[in-house]
Image (cartoon, helix red, strand yellow):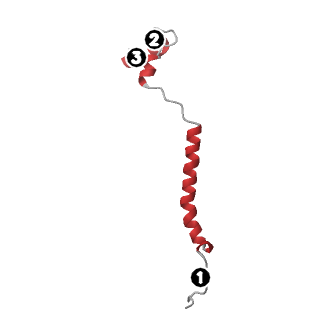
Amino acid sequence: MPSPNGPVSPWWRHPMVWLVIAGPASVVMACAVTAVVLIRHPDPALQTQATALAHAPAEDDAAVQPAMQARNHAATGGR
């Protein structure tokens, strides 16, 4: 018995099928590209607090003195 809408075309001839396939396929491709970029160019490690304290300049260092004076001045309320 023939179809009331005419001849039936194969599934790949319908544009809606390609829209349904293209959406998830593009997301998978974007994920793969992102993974490749992250593997090839990883972010540098952040400095932890323990590492920062170990490499902090001493308070008697001449380069830190103006900052230390300003911090102390601000903490005392300008007295």
Quadrant assignment for the N terminus: bottom right
3D distance between C-alphas at marks 1 and 2: 82 Å
What crowding class fits label 1: few (fewer than 14 Cα within 10 Å), some (14-19), or many (20 or more)? few
| Residue at point 38%, 19% (across, down) | 75
What residue is shown with label 2?
Answer: 58
Place of residue 14 in the rendered image (x, y in percent of width and height, measured from the top left): 60, 74
Report which quarter residue 73 is drawn in.
top left
| Mark 3 or mark 2: whose residue is earlier in sequence | 2
Badge nearest the viewer, 1 or 2: 1
Numbered disc 1: secondary structure: loop
Report which quarter residue 12 is drawn in.
bottom right
Residue 17's tag is none
What crowding class fits label 2: few (fewer than 14 Cα within 10 Å), some (14-19), or many (20 or more)? few
Nearer to us in this view, 36 or 53: 36
What residue is shown with label 1?
Answer: 8
Residue 78's tag is 3
3D distance between C-alphas at marks 3 and 1: 87 Å
| Mark 3 or mark 1: whose residue is earlier in sequence | 1
Q: Are marks 3 and 2 in contact (CB under 8 Å)?
A: no
